Image (tube, grey):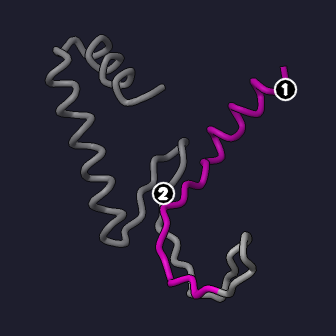
Amino acid sequence: MNKSELIEKLAVKSGINVIQSEEIVNLIYKKMKDTMVGGGRIEIRGFGSFVVKEYEAYQGRNPKTGEKIAVPPKKLPFFKVGKELKERVDQVAGK
């Protein structure tokens, strides 16, 4: 499912028009982004959690030339699947 499909499903399920549905989805995405940029954690019970992981700087190397390069520290978003979702996906995969 992509963002436009989510907007469409929300509009149909809730009985609102697509423009209102799009505003709701965009608001949720914006709040999630703002929370993660601010270093916060997002937890959706039964689905999973989003956190920002920090990685230290390290010495890497260019695989083409073998030249050593300094890789700066970075922060990346990380998703950890919730127990309920994990079990439901596993049940479907096991059938």
Check the image and report above or below for 53 versus 17.
below
Q: Residues within 10 Å of mark 2 (few under 14, many from 20)?
A: some
On the image, numbered disc 1 is attached to which residue? 94
At x 27%, y 34%, the residue is 25
Q: Nearer the viewer, residue 64 or 2?
A: 64
Check the image and report above or below for 6 versus 69.
above
Q: Would residue 85 appear left or right of 23 to someone viewing this image?
A: right
Q: Which disc number belongs to residue 50?
A: 2
Q: Residue furthest front?
A: 65
Judged from the image, the secondary structure of the residue bearing numbered disc 2 is strand
Q: Find residue 42 and report its horizontal and vertical position in percent.
A: 41, 57
Instruction: Write down the region rendered in magenta.
Output: 69-95
Q: Nearer the viewer, residue 56 or 68?
A: 68
Q: Find residue 7 and report its horizontal and vertical position in percent.
A: 30, 24
Check the image and report above or below for 87 versus 9.
below
Q: Residues within 10 Å of mark 1 (few under 14, many from 20)?
A: few
At x 63%, y 40%, the residue is 84
At x 43%, y 28%, the residue is 2
Q: Quadrant of the C terminus?
A: top right
Give the spatial CA distance, label 2 vs label 1.
27 Å
Q: Nearer the viewer, residue 10 or 77?
A: 77
Which residue type carries mark 1? Gly
- Residue 85 sits inside the magenta stretch: yes
For marks 2 and 1 on the same chain, the one whose residue lies earlier in the sequence: 2
Q: Find residue 24 and report its horizontal and vertical position in percent.
A: 21, 34
Q: Would residue 67 appear left or right of 95 to someone viewing this image?
A: left
Q: Quadrant of residue 12?
A: top left
At x 62%, y 38%, the residue is 85
- Residue 59 sits inside the magenta stretch: no
Which residue type carries mark 2? Phe
Q: Find residue 44 and report its horizontal and vertical position in percent.
A: 45, 47
